[in-house]
Image (spheres, helix red, strand yellow):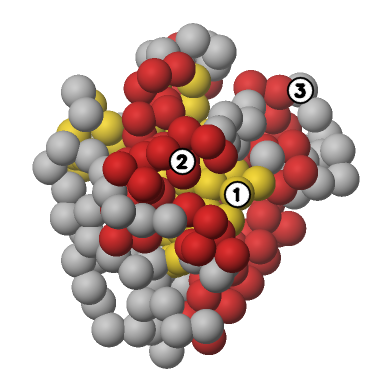
C-alpha cells in the first residue's frame, strides 16, 4: 500500500510534486550538477523523506555545509540513515556490468525499507557516467529508465536522473529524453515533449530487436 500523498520540492525553480516523479536533468557544467544535487538532498531532508545520492560527485563536505547553512546536521541525518550516499560504479555497475533488474530491485528495496522505517517517501538522484555505454549491459540503459517509470506506479520513489550533456552525444541525449516524463529546462521542471510512455517504448524496443 502506498503512503498518503504529500507534496514536496525536489530543488528546482517551480516544483512541488507528489512522490514518484521521474525527471531527466541534462546539465551543462559541474556547478549546475552540484547545485541540483545539493538542493535535491536539502529539500528531501526538509520534507522528512529518505534521500539517496548515487554519484561520483557526492562531496560530503559540500553536502554537510549546505545542510548546516539550513540548520540541519549532516552527521545526524547520515547516522540516522536519512541521507544515503553511494558511487555510481558501486551502485549501478556493482559487478562490472549494468543490470536493470538488479537496479530496479535496489530501488524497490530502498523504497519499501524507507516506508518500513517511518519515512513518508523516498527519493534518489543519480548521476550516470558515460561509461555505461561501454560496459556489459550497455544496450539496456534505456530499458532501465523506461522501467523506472513502471516501477514508480507500484513504488513511487522520486527519481532525478542526471546526465552530463558534455559527455553524452546529442543522439544519446535524445534517446535518454524519450524515457523520462519530465525534464529540466532553464532550472525549471517541465513536461517532456519527447517522452514515450513505457508500454509503447518497451514494445518498440522489442520489435526492433526481432
Which of the pair 72/138 is nearer the observer?
Answer: 72
Which of the pair 17/54 is nearer the observer?
Answer: 54
**Vertical comparison of 209 with 134: above or below:** below
Q: Is residue 72 left or right of residue 168?
A: left
Q: Is residue 93 left or right of residue 1?
A: right
Sequence order check, earlier mark of 3 and 2: 2
Q: Are marks 3 and 2 in contact (CB under 8 Å)?
A: no
Q: Looking at the image, is mark 1 or mark 3 nearer the viewer?
A: 1
Query: Which element type, helix, strand or loop, lies under badge 2?
Result: helix
The residue wearing badge 2 is: 63
Q: Distance of mark 1 from mark 3, alpha carbons?
A: 24 Å
**Vertical comparison of 14 with 159: above or below:** above
Q: Position of residue 154 (x, y in %)?
A: 46, 75
Q: Position of residue 149 (x, y in %)?
A: 44, 57
Quarter assignment of residue 60: top right
The residue wearing badge 1 is: 85
Q: Residue at x 42, y 26 (%)?
A: 33
The residue wearing badge 3 is: 134
Q: Position of residue 208 (x, y in %)?
A: 61, 36
Amino acid at each position: 500500500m502506498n503512503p498518503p500523498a504529500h507534496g514536496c520540492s525536489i530543488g528546482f525553480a517551480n516544483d512541488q510534486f507528489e512522490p514518484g516523479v521521474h525527471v531527466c536533468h541534462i546539465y551543462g557544467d559541474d556547478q549546475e550538477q552540484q547545485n541540483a544535487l545539493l538542493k535535491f538532498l536539502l529539500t528531501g531532508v526538509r520534507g522528512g523523506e529518505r534521500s539517496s545520492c548515487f554519484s561520483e560527485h557526492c562531496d560530503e563536505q559540500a553536502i554537510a555545509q549546505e545542510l548546516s547553512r539550513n540548520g540541519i546536521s549532516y552527521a545526524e541525518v547520515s547516522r540516522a540513515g536519512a541521507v544515503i550516499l553511494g558511487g555510481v560504479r558501486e551502485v549501478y555497475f556493482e559487478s562490472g556490468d549494468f543490470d536493470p533488474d538488479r537496479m530496479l530491485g535496489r530501488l524497490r528495496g530502498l523504497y519499501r525499507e524507507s516506508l518500513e522505517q517511518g519515512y513518508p517517501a523516498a527519493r534518489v538522484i543519480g548521476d550516470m557516467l558515460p561509461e555505461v555505454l561501454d560496459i556489459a549491459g550497455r544496450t539496456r540503459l534505456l530499458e532501465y529508465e523506461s522501467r523506472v517509470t513502471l516501477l514508480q506506479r507500484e513504488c513511487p520513489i522520486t527519481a532525478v536522473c542526471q546526465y552530463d550533456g558534455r559527455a553524452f552525444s546529442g543522439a544519446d541525449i535524445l534517446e535518454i529524453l524519450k524515457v523520462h516524463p519530465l525534464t529540466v529546462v532553464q532550472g525549471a521542471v517541465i513536461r517532456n515533449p519527447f517522452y514515450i510512455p513505457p508500454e509503447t517504448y518497451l514494445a518498440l524496443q522489442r520489435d526492433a530487436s526481432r
